[in-house]
Amino acid sequence: MTTGVPIGEFSRLCHLSAKTLRYYHDIELLVPAEVDAGTGHRRYQPGQVVDAHLIRRLRGLDMPLAEIRTVLAEPGEGERAAALSRHLDRMEAELARTRDVVASLRRLLDAAPPVTVLYRRSVPTPVLHAAARVARPDVGDWCGYTFGELFGLLGERGLDPAGAAGSTYSTEFFERDEGEVVAFVPVPPGAEHTAVLPARRYAVAVHAGPFQDCDLTYGALGAHVAEHDAGLDDPIVELYLVGPQHTNDPERYRTEVCWPIK
């Protein structure tokens, strides 16, 4: 049984920064399961990830905090779903730009099957890579441009990728909504490369669908690690098995989320 996870780890599970989580605690919107009386350190239970995901999406729909608190206080799933549906209907009538967020929220409300978690020990992998400090709102544009450059460089050398392209996200990226992101493309053995990814042990789950819903897989995988393994603060790795370079349909995306473990 888990005794809870610290705020930094919980921020990775739910994609809310530590600063935001502290604020939600202060206003009693999302209260930690435990607060150390001596240090003030907050710990959360993996079961709180569902409410965190819900809050994140409702804030994306500009729902006032008071209304979010009312939704969370609904006594049953039916009442909660009814309250959410009423708000979604209003938002769809008011602003067409909210449709992507609405679709993401509906996926959250659907009963999704549990993720399958596998374990993998990677080997040292030579790659072409690029790294930068990136803010969360800019990460999609940065990755799109950077992978275009990396694949272009690979093409100039007459090489095919030796595996799925991917990126790594530092713990700081999740805690502060800004941090180091590394994009990489594996190259064949003996080819010129700019870095070697180290060997590492991972818990792995595949996310199916748009990147904007990847936090659901993060939450399920991170909760599994919290309950069954010992997670590390090393960067999370995403491998794009099927991504924008393969299809224009985000529903067909397949992303491996690799959580570093001891």
Image: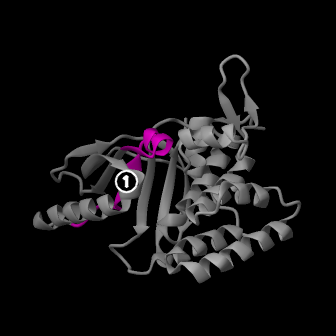
User: Residue 198, image x and y in percent?
Assistant: 36, 40
Q: Is residue 175 magenta?
A: yes
User: Residue 35, image x and y in percent?
Assistant: 72, 28
Dividing the picture into quarters, in which one does residue 70 lie?
bottom right
Rendered view: 176 above or below 110 = above
Residue 174 in sight in this render: yes
Residue drawn at x 82%, y 56% as measured from the top left: 73
The residue closer to the viewer here, 20 or 198, is: 20
Residue drawn at x 62%, y 55% as measured from the top left: 117
Rendered view: 129 above or below 146 = above
Looking at the rendering, in which quadrant would you find the C terminus? top right
Q: Name the residue tied to disc 1.
A: 167
Q: Which amino acid does the dot numbered 1 rest on?
A: Ser
Magenta part of the protein: which range?
160-179
Residue drawn at x 50%, y 35% as measured from the top left: 233
Residue drawn at x 40%, y 45% as measured from the top left: 178
Looking at the rendering, in which quadrant would you find the N terminus? top right
Rendered view: 180 above or below 238 = above
User: Residue 50, image x and y in percent?
Assistant: 70, 55
The number of discs equals 1
Q: Label 1's element?
A: strand
